[in-house]
Amino acid sequence: MAPFNVNVNAICPGLVDSERVDFIAAALVPEGQSAEEHRALMVRERNTRVPLGRIAVGDDIAKTAAFLSSGESDYLTGLSISVSGGSEMN
């Protein structure tokens, strides 16, 4: 796409605090625990494995997309950008 002056990059988010987390927690909730309790436990556990200490929020992903859409990134192409708080991307 470079000959057409089109940059192509990928945003690779880690776990994002969203309705998807609600769905996962509800699907995996153990007996005797509410979905809300299980969700909170899941998020706390995941936070301990993220070097920055928290899972992403939608705004983290949006800011990355806004940067890639701006002129500030006009020389960036062919990148996979991990937006995961420092978690390893495979």
Image (cartoon, rainbow, N blue to C red):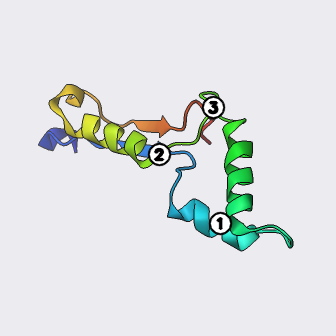
Q: Which mark is residue 68?
A: none
Q: In terms of secondary structure, where does tag 1 sit? A: helix
At horizontal 74% and vertical 52% (from top left) the residue drawn is: 41
Task: Give the crowd class for mark 1: few <14, some 14-19, many >=20 residues within 10 Å.
Answer: some
Mark sitting earlier along the chain (3/1): 1
Quadrant holding the N terminus: top left
Q: What whole-number distance in Å separates the C-alpha atoms at marks 3 and 2?
A: 12 Å
Task: Give the crowd class for mark 2: few <14, some 14-19, many >=20 residues within 10 Å.
Answer: some
Residue 8 picture location, percent across and down:
29, 43
Which residue lies under the disc numbered 1? 24
At horizontal 20% and vertical 26% (from top left) the residue drawn is: 72
Residue 18 picture location, percent across and down:
50, 57
Name the one closer to the observer, 35 or 68: 35
- Type of amino acid under label 1: Ile
Which residue lies under the disc numbered 3? 53
Name the one closer to the observer, 31 or 55: 31
Residue 16 picture location, percent across and down:
52, 50
At horizontal 27% and vertical 34% (from top left) the residue drawn is: 67
At horizontal 73% and vertical 59% (from top left) the residue drawn is: 37
- Type of amino acid under label 2: Val
Which residue lies under the disc numbered 2? 57
Q: What whole-number distance in Å separates the C-alpha atoms at marks 3 and 1?
A: 20 Å
Q: Quadrant of residue 55?
A: top right
Count how many numbered circles sit on residues in the image. Answer: 3
Q: Quadrant of residue 66?
A: top left
- Type of amino acid under label 3: Gly
Quadrant holding the C terminus: top right
Name the one closer to the observer, 87 or 78: 87
Residues at marks 1 and 2 touching, judged by CB atoms closer than 8 Å = no
Mark sitting earlier along the chain (1/2): 1
